[in-house]
Image (cartoon, rainbow, N blue to C red):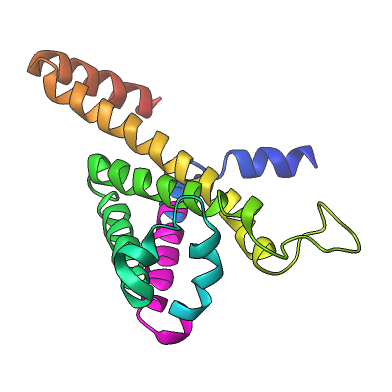
Amino acid sequence: MSSLIKTLAGSRLLKGDLDLHLIRGSMVLIFLLFGYQKWFEYEAQTLVPFIENGPLTSWMYPVFGLHGASYFLGVSEWLTAALLAWGFWSPKAGALGALLSVGTFITTVSIIPFMPDGWNEAAGFPAMQGNVAFLMKDVVLLAVSFYLLKQDLVRAARSTAERHELPEAARVRARAEAEAAAR
């Protein structure tokens, strides 16, 4: 077992930013697909119990109406997907997308305690059912969103610091990194 751990730990697959790229790509895909659904009648109807019972979403129907609320969410999700995708190249855009993602999942997780019929009557809490069981995935997606936000903020701070370095200091640092990589 320890040799397997050593082999995997030394693998090129686990070095670098592959994990960050996989997580970012997964979140882009999720937001693209969820955003796409919002343009159809079946999804507008499916959203009713979520929006009506959400403490952070209940304002949407009076403001936008049934379809407007769905379209608003679709546009928001596509904007989040675009910013997260842009984050492959721009940490500041990625951080903004991750911040929107955090907001999205704080909003959806806040619905859980207020969802009618979310807990099985016979088994009681924590035997979730129906829409609550569906929303529980958002707890993980919230954690993933925080991870992306942290990574992009660190990348953005690093690139800002590098832009403000003196040219000579940047050359010295690059030479030291090249020498360390050659060893």
Is 128 on the left or on the right of 62, as rendered? right
Residue 152 lies, in percent from the top left, at 34, 38
Residue pictured at 48% horizontal, 80% vertical: 45
Which residue is pictured at 82% across the width and 58% down the height?
A: 127
Q: Which residue corresponds to the image point at 46% horizontal and 55% vertical from the top-left?
A: 22
Please tell me whether residue 60 is drawn above or below residue 105 in the rendered image.
below
Rendered location of residue 107, percent (x, y): 48, 50
Q: Nearer the viewer, residue 116 or 3?
A: 116
State the residue in front, 47 or 78: 47
Q: Where residue 52 appears, x then y in whole percent?
A: 51, 64
Decide whether the magenta segment is chiefly helix, strand or loop: helix
Quarter of the image with the N terminus is top right
In the rendered image, which quarter is residue 134 located in? Answer: bottom right
Between 92 and 69, the one nearer to me in the picture:
69
Task: Name the residue at the bottom extreme.
Answer: 41
What span is in magenta?
23-43
- Residue 153 lies left or right of residue 34; in this view the side is left
Up/down of 74 relative to 150, above or below: below
